[in-house]
């Protein structure tokens, strides 16, 4: 070791000193932080600059380097603190963003839940309004009527638009051939003329109900053995059924006088409308027709009908082919549930008095009205769901010229009337016609049309 060693004069001091500083700095770990590493690189560059710069050792290098190192360490600490602060800030921001996302999701879920709750409250309130308030009931009924009108128009069948006209020939059935009635010259009959479309009154709707007998006619039109005018008189709030007897001798436009039930067969619905207007002075607002085969199916669809039979009717039905299926020929005296085949047989009986004591064709037309009233009573006791189901299955079996809008009008009128009572009439009425006579070998009823028209108008339209 040399005495009086002076570092200022040692030529190796500078190089060894900076090598040691470099070694110390290179052993410091900064955790891979990009910003701290960048700061270290910056210091490395500054150190290189000091080494390469021409410095006079006599200018106080030791003091300079110690002060500079102190500043460098402070800078490193500041940079480390800044980096840590940034990382903490980013973590906090991330947590805050996550929290906000969760809050947004929670808020969205709550909004959805609130929306569902509000919707349910509105729905329940609307249902309560429809079901338990008079205005609501009207709206609900209007919705049901509108839907019913659309179903009616879609599912029912139309009458043929251009019916084929048949020859003006007389049809003679077994009853005509077996009758011993006296022949009458039709030229001696006095006819009452009713030109025009027939009488009409605002608020009174007349719908023709037809039962078509088309057995053995193939695709051709049959005779209408059931002819009933159903009246809705909204002015008097009355429902009425008027039977027009099928054997009534009437004038048929374009044809010879004949039985009323032949008009549809000869010229379709339009000719039947004209015939009724000409003879009975009534304007009809529409028609509903079902053939006997579908009539039987409809009765079965609604679960049969409660019909009361006399002992004579029961025996007659069990021993004839009026009930076409032999296994159903087991009816009894009194009120009972009858199926479609049995009810159809009942409506065709004419040689036995009915429960009201009415015989012959008069008794048969009364049976028609009894059956219609039983159908009406059946519908009154069934629930709405059952009625809707029956409606969908029955409508395809019906022919009608009533549009959806007219159906809605009729249905609304019936609902607003709120009556379940049905009044009945038969035309011609007793004492206003001649029976047990023949015209061209056909057994007919010759009516006093003037008297019958007056009675019919009073019954349908009121005084």
Image (cartoon, rainbow, N blue to C red):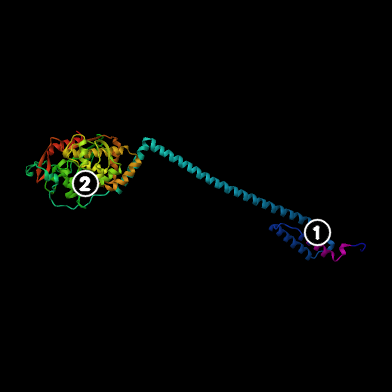
Question: Marks 1/2: CA distance?
Answer: 125 Å
Left/right of residue 100 with respect to residue 66 in the rendered view: left
Say if the magenta span includes residue 2: no
Picture quadrant where residue 184 is located = top left
Between 246 and 235, the one nearer to me in the picture: 246
Image x and y of residue 99, in percent: 60, 47
| Magenta-colored span | 6-22
Q: Give me the disc on residue 212.
A: 2
Q: Where is residue 403 shown, x and y percent of the image?
A: 27, 46
**Rendering coords of residue 414 (x, y %):** 28, 38
Residue 3 in the image: state x and y as whole percent.
93, 62
Labelled disc at residue 440? none
Indicate which label's residue lies in the foreground, 1 or 2: 2
Which picture quadrant has residue 376? top left
- In the picture, the quarter occupied by the C terminus is top left
Q: Quadrant of the N terminus?
A: bottom right
With 440 as the anchor, is 146 left or right in this view? Answer: right
Q: Residues within 10 Å of mark 1 (few under 14, many from 20)?
A: few
Write the residue at 16% across / 47% down. Answer: 262
Number of numbered discs visible in the structure rendering: 2
Residue at 79% x, 60% y is: 24
Q: Is residue 177 visible?
A: yes
Going by the picture, which residue comes out furthest to the right? 3
Q: Which mark is residue 65?
A: 1
Q: Which badge, 1 or 2, is on the more N-terminal residue? A: 1
């Amino acid at each position: 070791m040399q005495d009086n060693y002076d570092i200022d004069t040692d030529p190796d001091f500078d190089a060894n000193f900076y090598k040691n500083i470099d070694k110390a700095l290179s052993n410091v770990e900064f955790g891979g932080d990009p910003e701290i590493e960048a700061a270290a690189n910056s210091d490395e560059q500054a150190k290189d600059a000091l080494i390469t710069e021409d410095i006079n050792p006599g200018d106080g290098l030791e003091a300079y380097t110690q002060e500079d190192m102190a500043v460098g360490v402070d800078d490193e600490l500041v940079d480390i603190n800044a980096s840590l602060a940034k990382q903490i800030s980013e973590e906090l921001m991330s947590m805050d963003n996550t929290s906000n996302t969760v809050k947004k999701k929670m808020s969205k879920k709550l909004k959805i839940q609130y929306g569902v709750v509000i919707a349910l409250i509105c729905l329940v309130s609307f249902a309560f309004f429809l079901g338990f308030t008079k205005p609501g009931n009207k709206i609900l009924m209007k919705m049901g009527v509108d839907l019913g009108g659309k179903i009616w128009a879609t599912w029912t069948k139309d009458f043929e638009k251009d019916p084929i006209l048949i020859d003006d020939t007389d049809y003679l059935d077994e009853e005509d051939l077996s009758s011993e009635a006296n022949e009458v010259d039709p030229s001696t009959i006095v006819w009452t003329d009713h030109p025009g479309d027939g009488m009409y009154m605002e608020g009174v709707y007349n719908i023709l109900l037809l039962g078509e007998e088309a057995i053995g006619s193939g695709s051709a039109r049959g005779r209408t053995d059931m002819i009933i005018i159903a009246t809705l008189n909204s002015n008097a709030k009355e429902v009425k059924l008027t039977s027009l007897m099928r054997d009534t001798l009437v004038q048929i436009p374009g044809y010879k006088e004949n039985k009323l039930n032949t008009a549809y067969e000869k010229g379709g619905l339009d000719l039947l409308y004209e015939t009724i207007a000409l003879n009975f002075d009534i304007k009809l607002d529409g028609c509903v027709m079902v053939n006997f085969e579908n009539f039987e199916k409809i009765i079965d669809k609604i679960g049969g009908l409660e019909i009361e039979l006399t002992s004579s009717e029961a025996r007659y039905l069990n021993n004839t082919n009026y009930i076409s299926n032999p296994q159903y020929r087991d009816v009894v005296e009194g009120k009972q549930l009858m199926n479609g085949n049995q009810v159809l047989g009942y409506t065709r009986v004419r040689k036995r008095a009915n429960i009201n004591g009415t015989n012959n064709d008069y008794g048969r037309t009364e049976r028609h009205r009894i059956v219609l009233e039983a159908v009406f009573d059946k519908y009154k006791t069934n629930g709405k769901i059952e009625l809707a189901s029956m409606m969908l299955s029955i409508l395809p079996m019906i022919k009608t010229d009533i549009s959806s809008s007219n159906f809605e009008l009729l249905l609304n009128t019936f609902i607003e009337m709120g009556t379940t009572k049905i009044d009945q009439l038969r035309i011609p009425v007793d004492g206003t016609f001649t029976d047990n006579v023949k015209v061209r070998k056909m057994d007919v009823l010759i009516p006093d049309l003037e008297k019958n028209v007056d009675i019919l108008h009073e019954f349908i339209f009121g005084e």
